[in-house]
Amino acid sequence: MAPRAARRLLGALLFIVVTGCTLHPQPVSVDAGATFAAHREHGGIAIDRLEHGRSGRLEPPSFFRWGGKPTFLLESEGQTLAALWLAGSDVTVRSAPTETAPAIGRVRPDWDDGAIRLSLEPHDGEPLRTDVLGRTQPGEGLSTLTRADQTTLDVRGVYEATVRDRRGVAVGWLRTRISPYQAAPRIYEAVLPAAVSPPLAAATAAALDAEIDWIESHSVNVYRGNGGDSLGHSIPIGR
């Protein structure tokens, strides 16, 4: 084979390998006991675990959003399961990508001195509410996932909250892991009651992801001196 042809063949093979790795990223390891799991990816949220072992993805319906279009579509196995509209950390879930489609539910945030709680409100069913997300391991940051002033380094950590029914009884948990040193910069895991539908579970991850976006964008970036840069793009300087 001529040298030029060999170089072309080698280039084509490298392109296939790189493209394949890009389109098929390595799976993210999640808690074996979780009934729902997801992680942040470029352009959306990959759903690692729905019910019955399914996976899926939350991604924008198009590059541009206009005219009441949803923020995300939840897709799994070639089907659109739901549409999500985000307003800050508040998420409305409908069965189709039109504002007149039947409502599935809503995830609504509230704050305790800057620390977020989430209310899961199925359209037909009993609402649930989380405690504030508390840091589960010692770290440099504050003890909760909070909007209080802090740096991008302080936000890193593992945070978990108990999920409670309207009587205050614990019925599950919600966790997020935030770090540039893991397989994905943000990983979401939960144990949720069977009454929480897959779209509402996915909306919970979307709400929490939007809240972390807000916290990161308002935290002091230790690499640049101001906020606005995701932890997933920070330059590692040590664990």
Image: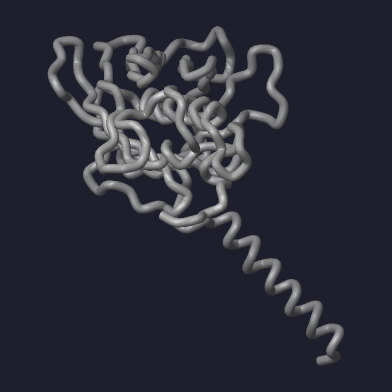
Q: Residue at x 47, y 45 (%)?
A: 185
Q: Residue at x 47, y 38 (%)?
A: 76
Q: Residue at x 24, y 31 (%)?
A: 173
Residue 168 image point, x, y percent: 15, 14
Residue 44 image point, x, y percent: 55, 37
Q: Residue at x 33, y 14 (%)?
A: 112
The answer to whether 161 is drawn above or below residue 39 in the figure is above
Picture quadrant where residue 69 is located: top right
Picture quadrant where residue 111 is located: top left
Q: Is residue 62 left or right of residue 128?
A: right
Residue 72 image point, x, y percent: 56, 27
The answer to whether 88 is drawn above or below residue 13 in the figure is above
40 or 214: nearer the eye?
214
| Count of numbered badges drawn on the protein | 0
User: The N terminus lies in which quarter of the figure?
Assistant: bottom right
Residue lying furthest bottom? 1
The answer to whether 6 is drawn above or below residue 15 in the figure is below
